[in-house]
Amino acid sequence: MYVEFLFEKRAVLFDLGDVRTLPVRKILRLSDVFVSHAHMDHFFGFDWLLRLCLGRDLRIRLFGPAGFLDQVEHKLSAYTWNLVRGYPTDFTLEVTEVSSETVGRRASFRCRTAFRREGETEFPIEDRRLLDEPNLAVEFAILDHATPCLAFALREKQHLNVWKNRLVELGLAPGVWVQDLKHALLTGRDEDTPVRALKRDGARFREATYRLGELADFLVHVSEGQKVAYVTDAVYHEANAERIATLAAGADQFFIEAVFGDELEERAARKYHLTARQAGTIARRAGVKFPTPFHFSPIYQGRGEALDREFRQAFLASGPK
């Protein structure tokens, strides 16, 4: 799941499968990558990400479950890095593993030091939160997939919408300054704070200075932030269902695996996956707005609508959740 931020050259990614379908320019915008677990179909895109970023002055944060630091280190140590000391750039991976709900470990891997594991530290995790920025939080739950598997919820704390038609009324052009305006509002800057905007002057642009308050009142609509949850690879039992429902509660967009149909419930349990009905029931229990089932088994090739129908029936069912 690729999430791009409007007016920013930034994106985050949930899981690292076949990312070759993403344009290179989109991959190079990634600031954070959240990996549910290191089964091959969720992590084999790491090598492509590495290849594209190598030789660029980028820093990407990677997050994964217990054991993730070792797994990233082993991936990197499979290659020969004898020539990288001469690179003018220093691509860096900052890797965090979730050891438990309350404890994490973090280390860095830098190109110029041949991706040796450096600066490893242990740190406390508060409120199961991996990112906590002025307007963005990413939380997690640890699920049972016969191995620890992370589910994630991305939450926008406030949604600041800049009206484009009002930009036109003021003769202003969009640009980096719009993000500066939003950041000033999110961090509670005084309404008299000067904001430098781009104003059209014929065919050119010039800088014009405004008060934060006058721009905010006219240009910006503030509403409740959006929430997106991502869940994959988990067996169905009450503990998992409760963790998922709590994490995803009230999500605007909810992506959840639905690997098998209900007729293969026993097979799903043996492989530690959800059926479409189980996934739909959890989505209803979480009270999400727009759920999307995914990660269908290849045996349903060409029959995905059957799983989607089973999922929707469970999600829309009446009665106890």
Image (cartoon, rainbow, N blue to C red):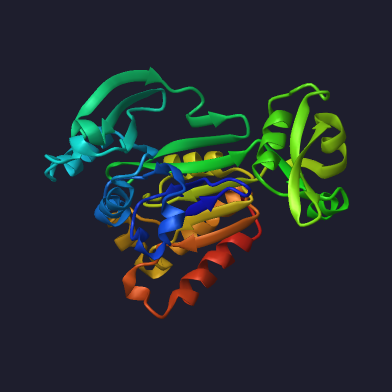
In the picture, measured across the screen, residue 309 lies left or right of residue 159, that is left
Q: Which of 41 and 257 is in front in this view?
A: 41
Q: Which of 17 and 278 is in front in this view?
A: 17
In the picture, measured across the screen, residue 210 lies left or right of residue 84, that is right
Q: Where is residue 263 in the image (x, y as percent from the top left)?
A: 39, 70
Q: Residue at x 32, y 51 (%)?
A: 49
Residue 206 in which image quadrant? top right
In the picture, measured across the screen, residue 86 lies left or right of residue 204, that is left
Numbered marks: total: 0
Residue 220 in which image quadrant? top right
Q: Where is residue 320 in the image (x, y as percent from the top left)?
A: 62, 51
Q: Which residue is drawn at 64% across and 42% down?
A: 176
260 up-or-down from 112: above or below = below
Residue at the far bottom in the pictured view: 302
125 up-or-down from 154: above or below = above
Q: Position of residue 274 (x, y in %)?
A: 40, 56
Q: Nearer the viewer, residue 222 or 217?
A: 217
Q: Position of residue 286 (x, y in %)?
A: 59, 47
93 up-or-down from 200: above or below = above
Q: Residue at x 27, y 33 (%)?
A: 110
